[in-house]
Image (tube, grey):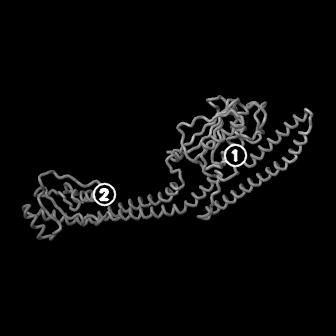
Amino acid sequence: MSFELLKHYMPRGIYGRAALILLLPVVILQLVVTVIFAQRHFEGVTLQMTDTVVRELALVLEVTDSALTAEQAIRDVQSQLGLLEISLAPAPDVAPENARVWYDYSGSVLTRRLSEQLQSIIAVNLAEGSRVDVYVQSRHGLMQIGFDRRRISAANPHQMFVYTIAFGLVMTIIAIIYLRNQLRPIKRLARAAEAFGRGRHVPYTPAGAVELRAAGNAFVDMRNRIERHIEQRTLMLSGVSHDLRTPLTRLRLGLAMLDDEDAELLLRDVADMQGMLDEFLSFAKGAAEGEPEPVDPIVMVDEIVESAQRAGRDVVLLAREGEGAGTVMLREVAMRRAVDNLISNGVRYGARAEVSVLLTEKTLRIRVEDDGPGIPEHQREQATKPFTRLDPARNQDKGGGVGLGLAIAVDVARSHGGVLRLGVSERLGGLRADIVIAR
């Protein structure tokens, strides 16, 4: 079996892998010790005790063969040898066979040893467990010699296995408690990193081993640097946009006082510049505006569509049949801006747009479809980059936009731990944009 094939059967979580690394050597060690103990203790001690009993059995056979009858042999064994723990009797008429329970390891050693040392032994019966019956061939016929099993096997041999299992369970419980304490800081770090990826700031204090504290401190420093960078970017672009609005306002007022026909074209250019500044400011704010809060996405999208309809856009909200209900942790202002941008792109490059919402137990999907020319598959990744305008794919004669609409939607989706997926609308034939967020 190759290593790649073995990886499919290995635990995927760090808890399972750590438990495997810690417990597997303990289990293997216990198995090795148990096997060695069984071979050395059960087999060695059983052989020594069997050899002692073999000598007594040899004396019994010698006295039995010297007696005139079987009855006299039985009396002579008790009177001459005084072996009160060994009984001698004629064997029953049933043909004897070796018998023992399947888990009686020392029994197999005992049977083999007796057969090797005494050639006259016909069979050994260990089925009763506490007694050994040996069937031997003597001059008086088949005789049955019985004695206590404890004379030939170690007392309470199962204690070693009981101790092994008991201490193994204790060590396993201790190992599990230790693993939980050691892996708890890793889980806390993972939750903090996942929350930060979704745009939420979860309080986190590094803890655990030295290596985990170092990783935690590195994460905290990285998070602080990213937050400072986002804040500085927002402040810088907001300041630039704000400073540029003042001269644009003066320029618009000055052009409004002119009656020349050229003033109308200049006013249009000023309005375009004002729209560009607004988009720059929206992109600068990105997904950092507001804090995540429980939001009903169906109600939110309904309000966005109604607002777009009042603004004269041809957009409809599809019927919500069979959809779930509930709230999702969202930055509502940022999400509204992302959906509104998708609707604006749809009606700008197409005649109409349709919006639908799908809310399940695991995901939230907001879909915007249009009947425009769409975006070719090989250009979709490029279309989501800031300040990208795809002239062949989207009709630029309809004006507006500086290539930030999809970039803002991507930024907002990623800040919520989701993704923006672009495809082809099966209903309208244009672009299909899905914002998919895990709940």
Q: Is residue 431 visible?
A: no
What residue would you read off at disc 1? Answer: 411
- Frontmost of labels 2 and 1 is 1
The label shown at residue 105 is 2
Seen at 62% across and 53% down, the residue is: 195
Instruction: Decide if residue 122 is on the left or right side of residue 326.
Output: left
**Quick check: 122 above or below 383?**
below
In the image, residue 23 above or below residue 375: below
Which amino acid lies under the numbered mark 1 shown in the image of this protein? Asp
Question: In the depicted view, which residue is nearer to us: 33 or 263?
Answer: 263
What percent of the width, then of the height, locates residue 346?
70, 34
Q: As shown in the figure, which amino acid type bears the numbered disc 2? A: Tyr
Q: How far apart are marks 2 and 1 (CA)?
A: 70 Å
Q: Picture coordinates of residue 427 (x, y %)?
A: 62, 29
Q: In which quarter of the image is residue 149?
A: bottom left
Label 2 residue SS: helix
- Mark 2, residues whose alpha carbon is within 10 Å: few (<14), some, or many (≥20)? some
Residue 184 percent location from the top left of the image: 55, 60
For residue 230, side relative to residue 112 (left or right):
right
Nearer to us in this view, 347 or 27:
347
Mark 2 vs 1, N-terminal side: 2
State the image coordinates of residue 141 (x, y, percent, origin top left).
11, 56
Determine the secondary structure under disc 1: helix
Q: Is residue 12 left or right of residue 380?
A: left
